[in-house]
Image (cartoon, helix red, strand yellow):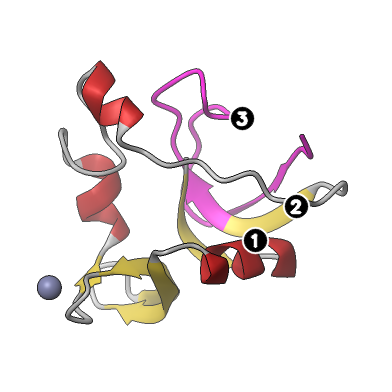
Amino acid sequence: MLQNVGAAPLPFLAAAAQSDADYRNRYSRSAECEYFMNHCNCGAPFGDYFLHSEPGHAFYPIGESGVKAIKAHRINCHDPLEFDCGFGGWSSLCPVENGTAGERITVPSA
Ligand SMILES: [Zn+2]
């Protein structure tokens, strides 16, 4: 699961814009940098630490129902996608193993 996405390729950003999520770049005082984050309907940001590192929250499911609540969207792109981000793997859905924030990684094409 990608997190603290500081830079993302256009196919990813286009797919995010077409989803029903409000996902956009914003400065995080906690992370002390700008990254793409989810926002509430009221415009309040949901920082990635909260969503990815707190058990039971959106991207840290603690049961099968939590996993099923996550919507995955296929990106129509045949080239590998390069991101400037961190990542964590909590399930077999994740294409990469655990790593640290700020690494530049490439997600293989499907
Ligand atoms: Zn709200």
Q: Which residues are magenta?
A: 85-110
Which residue appears at 21% of the width and 19% of the height? 63
In the rendered structure, which amino acid carries the disc numbered 3?
Pro
- Name the residue beneath numbered marker 1: 12
Which residue appears at 22% of the width and 74% of the height? 41
Tell me residue 103's x, y (percent): 59, 51
Vertical placement of residue 8 versus 34, above or below: above
Mark 1 secondary-structure assignment: helix
Precedes in sequence: disc 2 or disc 1: 1
In the rendered structure, which amino acid carries the disc numbered 1?
Phe
- Name the residue beneath numbered marker 3: 95
Label annotation for residue 59: none
Precedes in sequence: disc 2 or disc 3: 2
Which residue appears at 24% of the width and 77% of the height? 29
Which residue appears at 47% of the width and 40% of the height? 1
Tell me residue 38's x, y (percent): 34, 65
